């Protein structure tokens, strides 16, 4: 039995754009919380850390930590994280020598 292709109901083809007009990066579901964290991290004084209540995270700490890690790598920022039962901590570190 042969399968006949379904005819498209679209009257015009998909639009095309220049690659230069494509958005850079992605705006994932953690975008807002990560953007706020990056802003706050950049404003931190040396020797200070952010103390974020886990209840205020938009997802699990592991998922937010992963999204933050991706974002800091893109911005070439060095940060470290820690956590306890109720809080997630983030602070800037000195760049590692290569």
Image (cartoon, grey):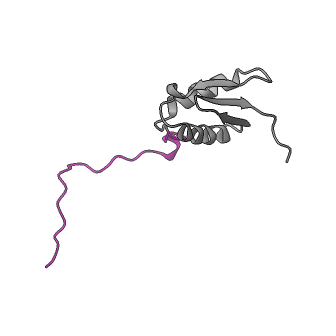
Instruction: Give the camera-side residue of 6 and 65.
Output: 65
Magenta residue check for 39? no
Q: In the rendered view, does 87 fall on the left or right side of 4?
A: right
Q: In the rendered view, does 19 fall on the left or right side of 4?
A: right
**x then y, percent, for residue 37:** 61, 27
Magenta residue check for 16? yes
The residue most toward the bottom is 1
Instruction: Give the camera-side residue of 94 and 24.
Output: 94
Vertical position of residue 1 compared to residue 31: above or below:
below
The residue most toward the front is 85
Q: In the rendered view, does 2 fall on the left or right side of 82?
A: left
The quarter of the image holding the N terminus is bottom left
Write the residue at 60% across / 37% down: 68
Q: How many marks?
A: 0
Residue 74 quadrant: top right
**x then y, percent, for residue 53:** 57, 25
Write the residue at 39% across / 47% down: 16
The stretch of residues the image draws in magenta is 1-26
**x then y, percent, for residue 79:** 72, 35
The residue most toward the left is 1
Q: Main secondary structure of the magenta part?
A: loop
Residue 62 quadrant: top right
Instruction: Give the camera-side residue of 77 and 80.
Output: 80
Instruction: Give the camera-side residue of 65 and 70.
Output: 65
Write the residue at 81% across / 38% down: 95
Write the residue at 48% across / 38% down: 28
**x then y, percent, for residue 44:** 72, 21
């Amino acid at each position: 039995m042969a399968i006949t292709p379904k005819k498209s109901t679209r009257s015009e083809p998909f639009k095309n754009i220049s690659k230069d007009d494509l958005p850079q990066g992605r705006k994932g579901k953690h975008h807002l919380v990560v953007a706020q964290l990056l802003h706050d991290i950049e404003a931190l004084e040396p020797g200070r850390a952010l103390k974020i209540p886990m209840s205020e995270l938009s997802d699990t700490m592991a998922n937010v930590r992963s999204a933050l890690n991706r974002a800091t790598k893109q911005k070439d920022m060095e940060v470290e994280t820690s956590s306890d039962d109720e809080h997630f901590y983030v602070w800037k570190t000195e760049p590692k020598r290569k």
